[in-house]
Amino acid sequence: MLEILQIPVLNDNYIYLVHEPNGWATAAIDPALAEPVLQALDERGWKLTHILNTHHHGDHVGGNLELKRKTGCAIIAMGRDKERIPGIDVEVAEGDLVSLGHAEARVLDVPGHTSGHIAFWFAEDLALFCGDTLFGLGCGRLFEGHAREMWDSLEKIRSLPGQARIFCAHEYTLANGRFALTVEPENPALLERMDRVQALREQGLPTVPSLLADELAANPFLRPDSPAIRQRLMMPNAQDWQVFAEIRRMKDEFVG
C-alpha cells in the first residue's frame, strides 16, 4: 500500500507526498512550494524520486526546480504542455504508465481546466490524483478548454470504481457545496454530505480526499443526468454535456 501524506500550503492548496515503501520511491504531486516538501521528507527519512505534475499553473509547479536541484528527482508531466512545465524530464500522454517503485499509475488525459491537464490513477491503491479537474462537490474552471471537453474528462473519472479516493489539489468543498445546494437542494446525499463537510471544517480538518461514490451522489458537476437537476434547469431533453455547461456557467456567476 502507498503511504500518502497531505501537505496543506498557501491558502487552500494540497501537495501530496506518495511513498512506495518497498521500492523506496517517493513522488511529490503538484508541489506549489519546495520547503514544506523538503521538511516532510526530512522528517520521514524519505528521498524524493519523482515529481508528478497535473498541469502547469504556478500553484502546482512552483516548487519543481528547487526540488529537482536539491534531490535530483525526475519531473513527469503531459508532453504536449512541456513548454510550460518547469524542469520536465519525462513526457507522458493518455494511457501511459508511470512506475513509482513497485506501484504504477495510469495517466488520464483530462483537459478542460487547462489544455494539458492530466490525472494519475493508482488503481491498486484506489487513489486518483486529479489536480484541478474534479474537486469535492465541484470541478475546475474552464480556463483553456470548453464544456464538452471538460465533460468528456469528467466522464473518464466517473467510470472509475466508486471506492476510488479523489485526491484533488484544493480545499474548496464547503464553498462548492453552497453552490451545489442551489442546483439540487433536495438531494439527501448532498444534504448529508454538507453536514459532514461543515463538521470537518469547524474542527479544522480536511474534506479531501473524498470517495468517488460520494461525489457521484452529491456533486452536481457529475450529475447532469439527474432528473431533478434537469427539471430545475428546464433542460429535460438536453445532452449531458449541455446540462454540465449550464451548471458550470451558473457556478462561474455564483456569489455565496
Image (cartoon, rainbow, N blue to C red):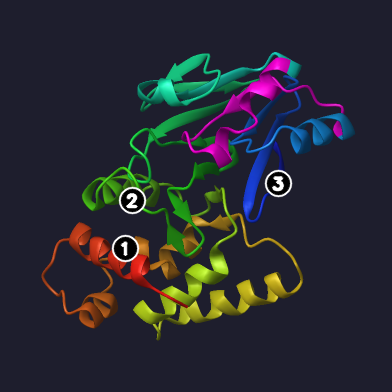
Mark 2 in CB contact with mark 1 (< 8 angstroms): yes
* Left or right: 190, with 205 as reference point: left
Q: Nearer the viewer, mark 3 or mark 2?
A: 2
Q: Nearer the viewer, mark 1 or mark 3?
A: 1
Residue 56: in magenta span: yes
Q: Is residue 1 visible?
A: no
Image x and y of residue 195, in percent: 60, 80
Query: In the rendered view, would you say 90 is above or below 136?
Result: above
**Cα distance between the residues tagged 2 and 1:** 8 Å
Could you tell which of marks 2 and 1 lies nearer the N-terminus?
A: 2
Query: In the rendered view, would you say 222 is above or below 174?
Result: above
Camera-nearest residue between 80 and 252: 252
Q: Secondary structure at mark 1?
A: helix
Give the quadrant of residue 141: bottom left
- Residue beneath disc 1: 248
- Residue beneath disc 2: 142
**Kind of residue at badge 1:** Arg
Could you tell which of marks 1 and 3 lies nearer the N-terminus?
A: 3
- Residue beneath disc 3: 6
> Which stretch is magenta?
44-69
Callout 1 crowding tier (Cα within 10 Å): few <14, some 14–19, many ≥20: many
Residue 143: in magenta span: no
On-image quarter of the N terminus? top right
Callout 2 crowding tier (Cα within 10 Å): few <14, some 14–19, many ≥20: some
